[in-house]
Amino acid sequence: MLILTSMPRIPLQTLPTFCAVAKLSNLRAAGEQLHLTHSALSQQIRLLEEQLGFLLFDRRGRRVVLNAAGAALLQAVEPALAQIDEGMRAAALASTGTGTEQRLRITVSPSFAQHWLMPRMAHWRALHPGMAVELHTSQQAMDLPREGFHAAVRQGKGPWRGLEGSRLIDSQQVVVASPAMAQRLAGSDPASWVHEPLLGTSECWEAWFALAGHPCRIQPVAVFNDMGLMLQATEQGLGIALGRELVAADALRAGRLVQLSPLALATEAYDAYWLVYPPEYRDWPPLLAFQEWLQSELQIAANLLQQSRAPAG
């Protein structure tokens, strides 16, 4: 005789917890990832096992290891949760109710945001009053789907795993100084600049001096983890900087910075700016509009930079 029995109803809220513990084999690490206490995590796993009627893990001291039943459940649950996440994002894209403002979440580096993007956001708002942009700044490459971002502006050569990208613009590194320092150095041999206070990494400066025909060892007076901060220090006369041309563009046009040499350092692996995004957002109208606007503004900036590349003096 064949007897069919139905499985008990699974508490769905426990499944993401189960997957995290299964992959990390550590309750503490899973709790940090999910922002749950150890006791809350243990309670969810216990609830799931009690509801199923069998154990999913073998306890080995502080570690928890999937048993055969747990491995079988993980194989089924993990792709199902990924499909649900994808469906939620698709639903968010389709949710464009009348009278509601669409919101585009973008993550960018602090220097790009402060020195280039923010001064142009009023223009974006004027062109697209119904599309709000929520900007997040970080030096780290965020996990876009996991953190709920629609796109990021990243620098490098790509590709980025799980993301699609559009190359926006290349931005080489140029030598800049405050107007007062530029006036003092006018007509000087670039080889003599090695004795000036230099801002930036020794690797980049040594590459620039080698390109200029003056190979040497460099000991900068200051190194910054943010390009914008370095350029602010340069404006205040702290030293000469080897800075990203795009980030310095507005200061060069306004005369707050002066480019000392037409010689620029270009490194293919680092110079390009990209707009990257999860594949499901490829044809989303707000993202397409932002990409088109961004490319237009960058082209304007590139054209204007042609007028700022003459050496001082």
Image: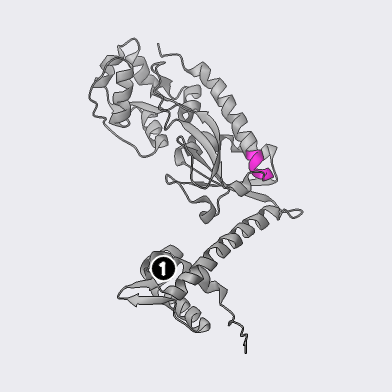
Identify the residue under disc 1: 31
- Classify 161 as above or below 298: below
Residue 150 position in % (x across, y down): 58, 48
- Determine whether, in the image, residue 18 is placed left or right of residue 64: right
Q: Residue at x 42, y 32 (%)?
A: 269
Q: Residue at x 23, y 29 (%)?
A: 219
From where the camera sits, is residue 177 visible?
no
Whether residue 183 appears in magenta in the rendering, the answer is no
The amino acid beneath tag 1 is: Gly
- Classify 171 as above or below 121: above
Q: Secondary structure at mark 1?
A: helix
Q: Nearer the viewer, residue 269 or 238?
A: 269
* Quadrant holding the N terminus: bottom right
Q: Which region of the structure is painted magenta? A: 284-290
Crowdedness of circle 1 by 10 Å Cα count: few (<14), some, many (20+)? some
Whether residue 285 appears in magenta in the rendering, the answer is yes
From where the camera sits, is residue 313 visible?
yes
